[in-house]
Image (spheres, rainbow, N blue to C red):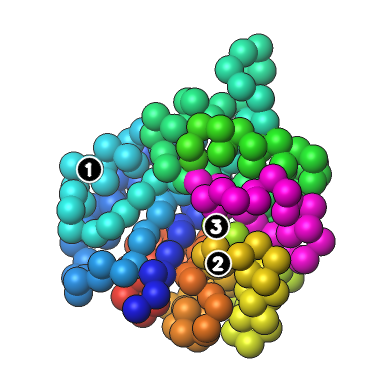
Amino acid sequence: MKKVFIVANWKSNKITKEARKWIEDLSNSNFNFMDFKEIIICPSFSLLSSVKLGIQEIIGQKLKIKVGAQDISQFDEGAYTGGVNGRQIKELADYVIVGHSERRNNFGEDGKIVNEKISKALKYNLIPILCVSDMKQIHDSRLVIHNSNFIVAYEPTFAIGTGTPDTPENADKMAKNIKEILGEIPVLYGGSVSKFNIKSFTQMSYIDGALVGRASLDVKEFATIIQNA
Ligand code: PGA
């Protein structure tokens, strides 16, 4: 059975007590034994530490669950006000989302910055979850991720937060194209994934999981997504 990754991207949402409640509620959900599913929770930087602790204390071994950051500074430690660097993130997380279209579009991150961020993630042994919305972005980052441990999420911008996902067939074709260029790496689909459509994506041959935004904020919906994946 293929390994399935389900990544929760909370974006700029939740405060500590809400995150804690979400973890408690997830822990109380009824899961069947699901060793082949890897769950990754990506909260804001301000929540990373409490989410990591909450998972250890509340969920423990019940569910294979890891923590990821939503961004990483393209710089190392030093005089970079507001930057959160790879060494700091590595204390709290195993994964980091890089190149999300919301960062490319709202924070002016171009291919060069995305590549610098990938390099920093790899330098600190964080696994980058590289988000791309088209094949050009794959080609732009191809050389930086070559031969390393990383995940790609195909997220067409028209599908993000709109309630209109891509078709599983098209997403699968993209995943196939991405693997042809980058090799046998996990490729996820992201964009309006819900408990109703998750299976239609994860059952495709080349798709190894999903990056879930809005639907990950509601713990009941997210638990059902994990169950249905
Ligand atoms: P969405 O977001 O699930 O709310 O469409 C996905 C994402 O941006 O990662």
Disc 1 element: helix
Q: Nearer the viewer, residue 64 or 161?
A: 64
Residue 166 as seen in the image, left or right of residue 85: right
The answer to whether mark 1 and mark 2 are in CB contact below 8 A is no
**Label 1 vs 2, first from the N-terminus:** 1
Residue 155: which numbered mark, if any?
A: none
Q: Nearer the viewer, residue 37 or 226?
A: 37
- In the rendered view, tell whether residue 28 sits above or below residue 229: above
User: Which residue is labeled 1 in the image?
Assistant: 56
Identify the magenta region: 127-150
User: Which residue is labeled 2 in the image?
Assistant: 184
**Label 1 vs 3, first from the N-terminus:** 1
Of marks 2 and 3, the one in the foreground = 2
User: Which residue is labeled 3 in the image?
Assistant: 151
Taking the spot 39% from the left edge, 69% from the top edge, the residue there is 3
Q: Is residue 164 visible?
A: no
- In the rendered view, tell whether residue 48 sits above or below residue 185: above
Query: From mark 2 to mark 3, how far is it between C-alphas?
Result: 10 Å
Identify residue type, mark 2: Glu
Residue 51 as seen in the image, left or right of residue 35: right
Identify residue type, mark 1: Gln
